[in-house]
Amino acid sequence: MRVLWARDDLTWRLQFLLDPEDSDTGTCADGQRIELRTNSCGVRLAESIPDPHNDLLAVAAWTIVAPWTKSRVTFDRPISARLAEALCSGWGVDAGPVSGDARTGSRLAVSYSSGADSVAVAAMFPEAPLAHLQRVSHRRVPNRWTHYRSDVLAGLAGLAAKTGREVSVVQSDLEFVLSFPRPGYPEHQAVAVGALLQADALDLGGIAFGYELGSRWLGGGRYLLRYTPENPMWAQDGAWGRLFAAAGTPIVLPVGGVSEATTMRLSLESELRDQVRWCLRGTTTPCGTCGKCLYKELIQAAVERRPMRTSVTAAAPVAKKWQEPPPYGGQEMIEYGCARVPGIEETPFARAAEFLQATVASTAWLDRCYPPAIDEIPEPWRDQVRAYMVDSIGLMTPDEARQVETWGADR
């Protein structure tokens, strides 16, 4: 893979050219097969800043080209030996050219979506700048996902500035380099492209993501539903963790030890609560009918100990999976919700509740923090996270921690 960056005022344009051994069909870190549609994209910054360190440009590019690179990557400007080693050890690729020193920084930024998880992280670090990446149309690829209202999400992110927060909204069409399964990040870490390109200007020494207990430790998403301490996407000693650290922007997961119920509560108690949004389709209000709205309504209703407010029925396509036996993606939160929502038998989750037979007692561990998640926070921010968890949430007992560590053992 050959990677070329060119700057045009506020916009950095990336072009990548496949080597003979590369393929236009690849697999990202979570196992999803993805197909390449186009070999270029752009990233438009909100203001003019000096060129970032070469390592930052390289990592930003790698979050986009990694799935299709087989054995080598050649950048258009030299990278540090530390970054080349991280690429070699993590992906088995030869990376170069190599020359120059690695970079460092001191501040933490939050990769910010306005979703409950990232708002919870922002609440924990009120002094951290918020970096939002907005999807915009590609100049050569038709946008067949116009129902995805990235403009609404970007507007909500921008409103965080009214609370005195430092906010940057960076626009990119990088999600359109995919043709299958749909527009999206080639690797999950591509959401940090804007933060990476601004890292020198903001003196960043870490990037915080809102990935919570299910995503970090319980095999969320497309992973096998099991305890995954070796999670290659988010573990500090995983490939991506080592790569970001080599660029002087280690991955920080402040809510990696708590459940979505906890991040929901923290976000709704924060000064950013009016901007919390997880629906990708709604305009002035959430659509209320998509799968994400249904899932998050279950969690919010459980946190607030009230009946669900939804027009979605068990017959709706978005509720079909909850009529089948488990396992389910995000099953820990389905159990949590089914155990706490009054009248669950009148909701689309009635069958799931029958299958799971969860209780408040059996899911109480999801109200506390898993201690090893604090231990892997990089040192500059570890004590702040620990103090917050102890004071505001509480730590799991050894027996509760074993609930995490045996998750999925019977599957």
Image (cartoon, rainbow, N blue to C red):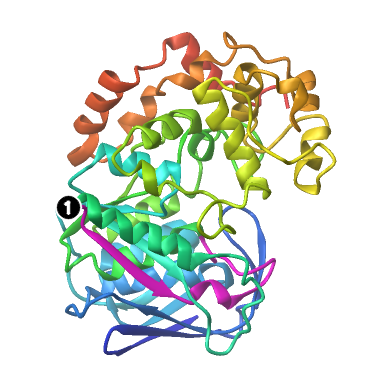
Q: Which residues are magenta?
A: 165-187
Which one is nearer the viewer's eye here, 227 or 164?
164
Q: Where does the image place residue 234, in percent across and percent down from the top left? A: 44, 46
How many residues crowd around disc 1 within 10 Å: few (fewer than 14), some, or many (20 or more)? some
Vertical arrangement, residue 127 with respect to residue 52, above or below: above
Residue at 57% x, 77% y is 177
Q: How many marks?
A: 1
Helix, strand or loop at label 1? It is: strand
The front one of 290 and 34 is: 290
* Residue at screen point 81% across, 48% down: 317
Is 224 on the left-hand or right-hand side of 325?
left
The image quadrant that residue 282 belongs to is: bottom right
Instruction: Please state if 391 lies on the left or on the right of 190 as rendered.
Output: left
Looking at the picture, how far across and down is residue 150, in whole percent? 49, 66
Q: Is residue 254 visible?
A: yes
Q: Using the rendered view, name the quadrant where residue 246 is placed.
A: bottom left
Task: Say if the magenta span includes residue 179.
Answer: yes
